[in-house]
Amino acid sequence: MIPFERIIAGIDLAAGGSDALRGADALIVLGEEILENWVEARNETPTAGKREGFRLLALHRQGAKGDPSFNACRETCRELVYHRNLIHGDPNSEKASKRLRMAGIVARHLCLFVQGKMEEGALGEFCCSSRPLHKEKSTEEVPKHA
């Protein structure tokens, strides 16, 4: 398993680089590493296959089997692919650096979701709400003012 801190550092580096093509491809690879962590945590071997031309999407499909709440990050994976494709479609565009930064935000969101999902299995049952992570563990009642 690749430490999430290392993945986040890689995302920051790739999203802030001057070469949008290389950065976009690096973010896809980092997205794959994020999903590999999820699959490995389930004691499975990450697939080498592709779905719609991307291993990232195949890894998501594998990770969602048996855990429908993992589908909460399906569109995040697809959005990461979308930004990569925009950059590859017009790498010299003035928008390429903005698109790369946005892809970095999306990759970070994917990482935080998977990291949270590994801590709290119910994460994703209500969109990608992190409420279960922040819920007060104490069941004390709030005192009423006299």
Image (spheres, helix red, strand yellow):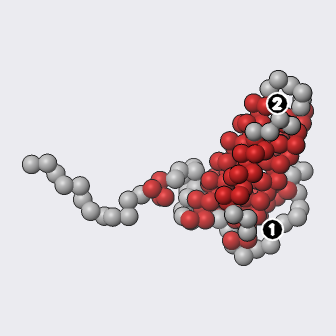
- Of discs 1 and 2, which sits in the foreground? 2
Front-most of residues 63 and 22: 22
Q: Residues within 10 Å of mark 2 (few under 14, many from 20)?
A: many
Residue at the extreme left: 146
Picture coordinates of residue 95 (x, y %)?
80, 26
Numbered tag placed on residue 46 in the rendering: 1
Q: Is residue 140 above or below residue 144?
A: below
Residue identifier under label 2: 96
The disc label shown at residue 67, or none: none
Q: Position of residue 55 (x, y in %)?
A: 85, 56
Q: Nearer the viewer, residue 107 or 78?
A: 107
Q: CA distance from mark 1 to mark 2?
A: 31 Å
Type of amino acid at the residue the image marks with label 1: Pro
Query: Considering only vertical position in the picture, is 95 above or below 106?
Result: above
Please state, as top left, top right, bottom left or bottom right, where the N terminus lies in the image: bottom right
Whether 57 is drawn above or below 82: the answer is below
| Residue 121 makes an appearance in the image | yes
For the residues labelled 1 and 2, say whether their Cβ atoms are less than 8 Å apart: no
State the image coordinates of residue 26 (x, y, percent, origin top left): 83, 48
